[in-house]
Image (cartoon, grey):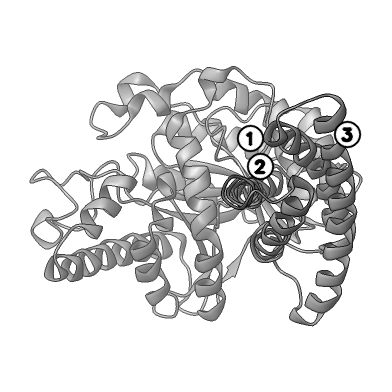
Amino acid sequence: MRNLIVSADDIGLSKTNTDSILETVDKGAVTSVSILANGLAFSYAVEKVRERTGLRVAIHLNLTEGKALTPHEEIPLLTTIAGDFKLSSAGLWSQYLFAPKKARDAFRVQVKKELRAQISVVRTALGYAHEQRIPVDGHQHVHMVPFVFDVLISLVDECALQCVRIPNEPLYIARVPFTRVGLMHVVGLFGIHALAKSARRKATRAGMHTNDAFVGLLYSGYVSKEVAEAGLAACVVHHPKETEILFHPGVAGESELNVWKGNTAWHTDTARGVEHSYVMSEDAVTLFNAFKNGTLSAGPDLFKILRYLISGGTAAFFHLGTLFLIIEYTHLWYVYANMFAFGVGLSISFFLQKFWTFTGHAPGRVHHQVFQYTAMQLTSLGITTGGLYLLVEYLHMWYLLAEFLLVLGVAVGNFFISNTLIFKKHGIS
C-alpha cells in the first residue's frame, strides 16, 4: 500500500474559500488542508478544522501575499509600509542573491521572525501541545527558496515541525487546454526539480519527514481528472512510499478579497470549480484507491527521457565532432575515424548516463555496468559502422548525415536497454 495525501491549500483565505474546501473534506476525497496564518478568515478556518479531528492540518507558510503578522518596522525587507508582503517567491530569491552580505543576513533574520510568528499563531490557535509536531508547506512554494528553506530547517526543534512538503513533481503531459499551463509553473517545475534533492537531505538531517512524490505544480489551479491520472501514473514509476497530490478547490468571492494584497484573480478563478468537482467525484476516489493499492499502471518517466536525450546528444556531438576533425585534418578513412570517435563518445556517454540520467546506483555495480554498457555500445558501433559503409558507398549519402541518422536510431533501442537492464533501479530518483 502507498500512502497518498490529498491536499487542499489556502484554507482560511476567506470564508467562502474555506467553506468550499471543507465541502471537499466532508463529502469528497481531501484528507489534508494547509491553513494560511494571515488569511482573512483564519479564525473561522481554525474553528472549522478543530471540529474535524481526523483532518491533517499543515501550516501554509506565506511570505508573498496578504499582510505579514510581524510589524513592518521589524521586517522592512519583506513588507511595504502598510505591512503587506511586497515580493514574489522569485523576487525574494533574486533580491537575496544580489544583496550584500549584511542585507542577506538581515533577510534571514526577518524571514525567521515572520515564519516563527506564523507557526506560533497556528499552533496556539489549534491548541497544540509544545511537543506535538505539525506539518508545514509554503504558499506559492516559497519555502523552497533555498535560504528560506534553511531558515525553516533552523526552526524544526524550536517550533516542533513534523514534516515538510517537497513539491518535486515528475514531468508528464495531460490533455488539458494549453492556456492552463503557466510559464511560471514550467519554470517552477524545473527549478524545484533542481532544488529537491538538496532540500530533502537537509530536512532528513533535521529529523523532518518528507513526501517522496508530488502532483499539482505544473497544472496548478487546473488539476482535472486527466491531470490527476497522468500525474499519479508518472509517480508510480518511482515506487514512492508517500505521495501528495495538491488541489486548490476553494473559490473566494470577489468582494471578500478587497483588502487582500496578491493575485486575487488566481483565488477567484472559476476553473477552481473543475478541481472542486473532480475531487468530489467517484472518479477521484477510484483513481486514488488504484494508486494506493498498486493497481494503477506506471506512466513514462519524461524527466529521465529528457536527461537521456541531453546526455546522448552531448555524446553524439563529441562523437560527430571528433569524426569530422579526424577526417578533415588527418584524412583517415572514415570507417577507422568512426571507431576512434566512437571511443570518445562512449566515454562521455557512460559518464553522463551513469551519473546523471540513471542516478542512484550502488558504486559496487560500476564495473558490471561498464562491461554491459560497453557491450551494448560495441553492438551499436557494429550497426553504425556497417550502416555508415552501406549508406555512404551505395546510397552516396554525406557521411555526417548518415552517421547522425544511425546514431539517432540506435539511441532509442539503447535507452530501453539502459533503463531496463544496465541501469535498472528502484526508488525515488
Viewer-closest of 298 and 142 = 298
Viewer-closest of 357 and 264 = 357
Query: What number is the disc on residue 24?
Result: 1
Whether 16 is drawn above or below 304: the answer is: above
Give the residue number, with chain letter if any, for mark 2. 30
Give the residue number, with chain letter if any, for mark 3. 390
Cα–Cα span, label 2 and label 1: 6 Å
Viewer-closest of 7 and 350 = 350
Whether 419 is drawn above or below 48: the answer is: below
Q: Is residue 232 left or right of residue 129?
A: right
Mark 2 residue crowding within 10 angstroms, few (<14) / some (14–19) / many (20+): many
Decide: marks 2, 1 in contact (CB < 8 A)?
yes
Cα–Cα span, label 1 and label 3: 64 Å
Q: Residue at the spot x=24%, y=35% of the render? A: 261
SS at mark 2 in the image: loop
| Residue type beneath disc 2 | Val
SS at mark 3 in the image: helix
Decide: marks 2, 3 in contact (CB < 8 A)?
no
Give the foreground label among 2 and 3. Answer: 3
Q: Residue at the spot x=32%, y=39% of the render? A: 40
Residue 55: x and y, percent?
62, 53
| Residue type beneath disc 1 | Thr
Residue 256: x and y, percent?
33, 26
| Residue type beneath disc 3 | Leu
The first of marks 1 and 3 along the sequence is 1
